Image (tube, rainbow, N blue to C red):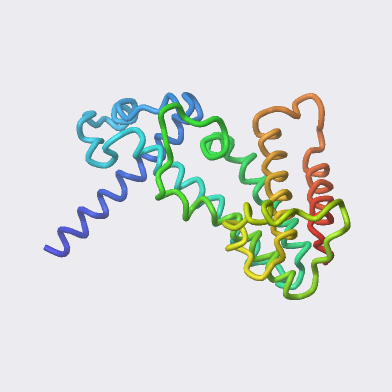
Amino acid sequence: MTASRTARERVRAELTREITDIARRQLATEGAGGLSLRAVAREMGMVSSAIYRYFPSRDDLLTALIIDGYNALGEAVERTDAASPTGDFLGRWLRVCHTMRDWAVSHPHEYALLYGSPVPGYHAPQDTVAARVRDVAVLGRILTEAHRAGAITPPDLGPPPSPAVVAEAADISALMPGVPGEVVLRGAIAWTSVYGWINFEVFGQFDNTIEDRKSVFDHLLRVLAGTMGLTR
């Protein structure tokens, strides 16, 4: 019975992978809004009712694709940071952000599912949260370790944030224990600026304007590092 159950589990896992692989190809041609369980079933040569044993609804399939996408991006970022010298905080920031950009450019349709227009009628469940924060957790680790090492000296760029503004960053602060609220906020601004650039690039806003995007992106990262006060 155990061997039989294990065989069934392997078959189920293989079919699940095949379904999600086909669904990812659909993203490229139809977009997330056009994702169809029936179309996936047709491509697999499976009756449409059978596919519902694996994904009861289109939203369940979308959720699986979203979690897979966040995990793929998160794993890439984590590998990059793990391979970087621990005390090279600026270098870690640069390499991690370049990895994010490289992944997005190489997987534009999966990136669009994560950070593009919301899919009408779809609401991401709580199941996506753990995967969604993997990349920002790496930023939190870099800033936390840099702060402990005395490698953060925020420049005087304007008035300090009010307590109310700092309080708004409470959830982010949980990823950066012991880091001053002002630095947490600057980290959030830097992180969202990185994604703003990537969105412009992936969605074609730089077409016929910026050609050497990698070099300009690298300059942006260094400016943002200065804004955070990441000195080394």
Q: Residue at x 21, y 60 (%)?
A: 6
- The correct choice, above or below, for 219 with respect to 37 in the image is below
**Residue 230 position (above or below residue 108):** below
Q: Residue 86: percent from the left, percent from the top?
A: 70, 72
Q: Quadrant of the N terminus?
A: bottom left
**Residue closest to the eye, 167 or 59:** 167
Residue 224 screen position, x and y as percent: 80, 51
Q: Is residue 125 left or right of residue 169?
A: left
The x, y position of residue 171, in whole percent, is 57, 57
Residue extending farthest bottom:
149
Question: Residue at the location (82% across, 44% down)?
Answer: 215
Q: Is residue 6 left or right of residue 181?
A: left
Q: Residue furthest left?
A: 1
Quadrant into which the C terminus falls: bottom right
Q: x and y percent of residue 157 in the render?
A: 87, 52
Q: Nearer the viewer, residue 203 or 168?
A: 168
- In the depicted view, which residue is nearer to us: 93 or 190? 190
Residue name at image x 47 percent, y 24 percent? 30
Quarter where residue 5 is shown:
bottom left
Asked which quadrant contains residue 181, the reply is bottom right
Give the total number of marks visible in the rendering. 0
